[in-house]
Image: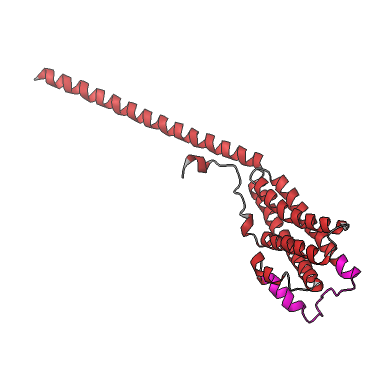
Amino acid sequence: MQEEDKYHYLRKQAHWENLWFYQKTVTLYDMTVVFCRRFLPAHGDRTVDQMVQAARSGKQNIVEGSADGVTSTEMEAKLLNVARASIKELKEDYLDYLRSHKLTLWDVSHPRYAAMQHFCQKHNKIEDYEPFFDRWTDEEMANAAVTLSCMVDTMMQTYQKKKEKEFVTEGGIKERMTAARLDFRSDKKEELEAAHREMNALRARLQQLEQENALLRQQLKQI
């Protein structure tokens, strides 16, 4: 192991692009942009800006939280909470739309509920949803967005619990910096002690050789 790797104190940055809940937030963002373009007024409705901004905030704060998590567990936790709050806000906007437009929120008794749940669970990436963006009705798209929002929130709760466990076992950056420094000092102390032992052994061997040399000289004089 290289020395710079052995004493590292920075946490590994999460590959957020591989996180399923992040991929779903990308889908939610693009879906929301299309939903607002198709079903909400282009001007004069603040809901459009609010929905798009909430969707973007959910996605971007996951990225920023993962990046900041390299040095700050606290900042990562705060930004992930902001992301969850933004997705919840977005879900409420879709629920408001369904209610105010007298559309149906698909619950477990709805004939299309199970298929929608299965599709959203199985598919994370935007490519899986894009073919439907211009085909779904507002009711279909809003229900898909609500479902994705709920799944993102559940996945993020699980992810945050994992991060909490990591913090308890590994500590924050101050603890990791202290641990790395102590490990470095401990290793250097062991190296120094080993060098002293080797030096003492060499001194003892040198003394033995000098004694043997003196004895040999005496024997030569007697010849």
Q: Between residues 126 and 206, which one lies in front from this camera angle?
A: 126
Residue range in magenta is 96-121
In the picture, measured across the screen, residue 9 lies left or right of residue 44, that is left
**Front position in the image: 192 or 86:** 86
Residue drawn at x 77%, y 52% is 82
Identified at 74% across, 73% down, the residue is 135
Relative to 130, residue 57 above or below: above
| Residue furthest bottom in the image | 111
Where on the picture, by quarter, is residue 105? Answer: bottom right
The stretch drawn in magenta includes residue 106: yes
Q: Is residue 32 left or right of residue 223?
A: right
Q: Residue at x 72, y 59 (%)?
A: 156
The correct choice, above or below, for 121 with respect to 194 in the image is: below
Looking at the rendered image, the quarter that the C terminus falls into is top left
Whole-percent x, y for residue 64 in the image: 69, 48
In the image, residue 176 lies at what x, y percent?
Answer: 62, 42
Q: Nearer the viewer, residue 115 or 208?
A: 115
The image shows residue 216 at horizontal and vertical percentages of 17, 23
- Residue under the point 29% across and 26% down: 206
Query: Dividing the picture into quarters, in which one does residue 83 lie?
Result: bottom right
Left or right: 221 as drawn, with respect to 6: left
Above or below residue 135? Residue 8 is: above
Q: Is residue 133 magenta-colored?
A: no
Query: In the depicted view, which residue is nearer to us: 222 or 212?
Result: 212
